[in-house]
Image (cartoon, rainbow, N blue to C red):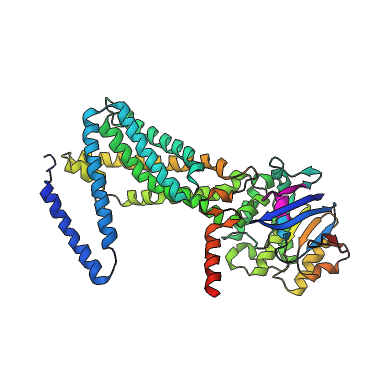
Amino acid sequence: MATIDISIFSLALTFILLALPAALSLIFGFNLIKSLFYSVARMSVQLILIGFFLKYLFEWNNAIINLLWLTVMILTAVYSAVKSSEIKTGKIFAPVFISFSFATFIVIFYLNIVVIPIENVFDARYLIVLGGMLLGNSLRGNIVGISAFYKNIRKESKEYLYKLSLGATLYEALLPYFRDSVRLALQPTLAAMATMGIVALPGMMTGVLLGGASPETAIKYQIVIMIAIVTSTILSVVLTILTTIRICFDKFGVLQPDVFIDYKNGGNKKRIKRNKKLISKTE
Amino acid sequence: MIKFENIHINYGGVKVIENLSLEIGRGEKVVIFGKSGSGKSSLFSLLLGFTTPEKGKVFFDGKPVDEKNVWNVRENIAYIDQSVSLGSGKIKESLASVFALKANAGLGFSEKRLNDLTNFFDLPPDVNDKNIEDLSGGEKQRLAIIIAILLKRNVFLLDEITSALDEALKKKVADYFANNNEYTCLINSHDPVWLENPTIKIFNLDEKKWLQ
């Protein structure tokens, strides 16, 4: 039994459901209506565009175009991760891009060549769809891991410098932060895996089942994608941290404050703004 | 042993230290005296390579402190900072991690030596089983002092290490460092207890003059 298509009229009917959250927001003053409709509208437009795009992508199924599109997806993911790390984009974009690309391609090609395996490893259906799932899910872990690493070292600069003064090498001083960040990055995925299937059927499985595959096939795909996600997440977090260390720390082993976006010459921009506000309040 | 040559330090566009030259010989104990914010802690940062001066040079044991040898310089200096940045968690683990560093692996950690020192500085004998967060300010300070001593280094940078101690302990700590001939000490402190020792030299950072 193949997927039952939803007509545009039926799709419109789904939007009626939004009356519920809208009503609740009005009743209780959640103030969510604006962001709710903005997000739904934006999602709809993006998905419609992507729908058209994927239609042609699948039709052409050109290896070069597929790879290019995957690269665009990686670039977008990298930009998202870098932005949230609060480190200046220009400084770390290149190493993060290389790390993400390496982590994604290695896992995707392992799946396409060894695990599945498919005739055309650049097949749009497998390269882009699976690649997208990998990227999307490991992106979350990366954002958490990378930003935790640098923010914690900046926050605990006194402890970090003290470790250096005890005689620690750069690696020794960074190790506890490195470990914490990677563990933090993997936590959501590990937790999701632990309860998978018990709480709810995960997205991949749902899609595969709705597409008409048997449950046996569906669960196999789910297992494959989860292992792929955890592998690419840890690979990309580790590689990203290792490759950006050389840029963000000087040869004395000190984290350079000017790698952060909110750094202003002479001190923390946010702190200066905050102090100015306080001073103007008391005057 | 330690030489600051024509040092200029800026912080946030403000001149913190201007044209300072200061030399501390082996075995000397020097207290740096000056207003808060006059850059006393900056001198420690310079020596440990945590900051670099706008102008001027820093020398340790005759060699300029640069990115290559700073790692070696750090292995020869015991630094106790004002905020006692020991972190948190079990003291036992914290101590173990200090001596697990490659630089300190050859030192050999002696429980007996630890006990002698905890006794000497009036810490409870079971301090090793406690958590860092459970210690008082004064106890943390003494723990940091003990760690510094256990590192078996001969140059000490002491940043307000008596601030949380009572009179008797202040004297004990000051005497311990002042009277050890092997030690070279650069001391940042407002505490007059240091001045009671004849071995102590005093340098006024604001006026860039030796007082004693």
Which residue appears at 55% of the width and 66% of the height? A275
Side (left or right) of A247 relative to A125: right
Residue A263 location in percent, x, y? Answer: 55, 53
Left or right, residue B37 beside residue A11: right
In the picture provided, is A153 more to the left or to the right than B160?
left
Q: Is residue A74 visible?
A: yes
Q: How many marks?
A: 0
Residue B25 position, x and y percent, is 85, 52
- Horizontal and vertical percent for residue B199? 87, 62
- Rendered position, B136 above or below A96: below
User: Splitting the image into 4 quarters, where does residue A50 fall?
Assistant: top left
Q: Does the magenta stretch include residue A92?
A: no
Q: Can residue A180 be seen in this view?
A: no
Residue at (47, 41) in percent of width and height: A93
User: In the picture, residue B32 is in which quadrant?
Assistant: bottom right
Residue B54 within the magenta-colored segment of the rendering: yes
Image spot of residue A216 (x, y percent): 21, 40
The answer to whether A47 is drawn above or below residue B115 in the figure is above
Instruction: Tell me the magenta residue range.
Output: B43-58
Q: Residue B202 versus residue A1: which sits nearer the camera?
A: B202
